[in-house]
Amino acid sequence: MSGEVLSQSEIDALLSALSTGEMSADELKKEESEKKVKSYDFKRALRFSKDQIRSLTRIHENFARLLTTFFSAQLRTYVQITVASADQIPYEEFIRSIPKMTILNVFEVPPLDGRILMEVNPNIAYAMMDRVLGGRGASINKVENLTEIETKIMSNLFERGFENLQEAWSNIADIDPVLTEFEVNPQFLQMVSPNETVVVISLNTQIGETTGMINICIPHVVLEPIIPKLSVHYWMQTSKKERLPQEIEMLEKRVKKAVVPVIAEIGSTEISIQDFLMLDVGDVIDLNKRIESSFVVKIGDVPKFLAQPGKIGRKLAVQIIENVKGGDEDDK
């Protein structure tokens, strides 16, 4: 038999046919040896393997988490976004599956060719806009009568939200998403040929009490240069590969340019709250250090050096005289 799994009823029927003589074991073996012909629909060309679809699903699960965080902060209400499915279908089939009037955001993702489409259900889009304008998140569907202000608010919100795709895709491509079109009628939008294979990532979205779908349509032409990076082998190699010398050098340069606070702690003392409240200009506070003794210099909160006070011109300064023992260990 082929790799198909039979149900219990099919197994019982097969055993019954063998026992009654309706089917012989020889006939069964002959049927197994014959080549099976599998129909192939060229209009639904499968250009991505299951492994690559799983990788895209994982990437966009991270994107969904980033969107959840972004929209929660922007809308100040309960937001939950999760991946519902990831399928490869012809572009024409995707266009037919979405509402006739909906919110369509078209993005370019340089340096990759082609464009990515984000379709947002109008109920979700209006709930978001209502929250941005100070409402409770009520949803009304009048997408065919969008005003210029509503269009601007929605496009700005989705453009900033889609920027999170840059972080989600960072392991496979360094992209810079840019919103190029905002449309409400899918019939006026022709990104690729009708038979072009696209990957559609469907996101279950809940904004307050409103639910709906966000669909991300990615044409094959966009993913073609990075298809090898979608395999499990690439992910395993990426997790194990060592840093290149130029990466280490770049990291060292960035660390050297990092700004850290330097604190020269001349001394300390303890006083009561009552004495602190009575302090006035001209009062003197006794410290636990003598003027001729050295004091600690801290990098951040870590003691690193011993120093003595001094002046350079008219500016106060400290002169480092030795390292603090144990400073490096504390730093680690």
Image (cartoon, rainbow, N blue to C red):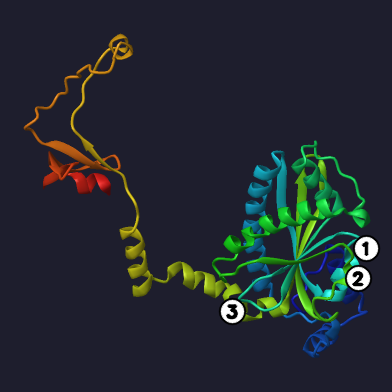
Using residue 37 as the reference point, say whether residue 238 is left or right of it. Answer: left
Mark 1 and mark 2 residues within 8 Å of each other at the beta carbon: yes
Question: Toward the viewer: 169 or 257?
Answer: 257
Residue under label 3: 228
The answer to which image quadrant residue 232 occupies is bottom right
Q: Which residue is mark 1?
A: 100
Q: Nearer the viewer, mark 1 or mark 3?
A: 1
**What is the number of the mark on residue 8?**
none
Judging depth in this view, the residue of 24 and 181 nearest the camera is 181
Residue 249 coordinates in the image, percent (x, y)? 33, 69
Secondary structure, mark 1, is: loop
Of the numbered discs 2 and 3, the one sitting upstream in the chain is 2
Residue type beneath disc 3: Pro
The residue shown at (22%, 16%) is: 283
What count of labels does the image hold?
Answer: 3
The amino acid sitting under disc 2 is Gln
Q: Position of residue 116 (x, y in %)?
A: 73, 70
What is the C-alpha distance between the residues marked 2 and 3?
A: 33 Å
Please state which amino acid type lies under the numbered disc 1: Lys
- Residue at the spot x=80%, y=80% of the render? 196
Say what secondary structure mark 3 lies in: helix
Q: Is residue 251 visible?
A: yes
Judged from this view, the residue extending furthest toward the front is 314
Rendering coords of residue 4 (x, y %): 78, 73
Residue 323 in sight here: no
The residue labelled by disc 2 is 187
The span from disc 1 to disc 3 (Cα, nearest Å) is 36 Å
Image vertical order of residue 50 relative to residue 125, above or below: below
At x 8% / y 33%, what residue is drawn?
293
Front disc: 2 or 3:
2
Find residue 284 and report its image quarter.
top left
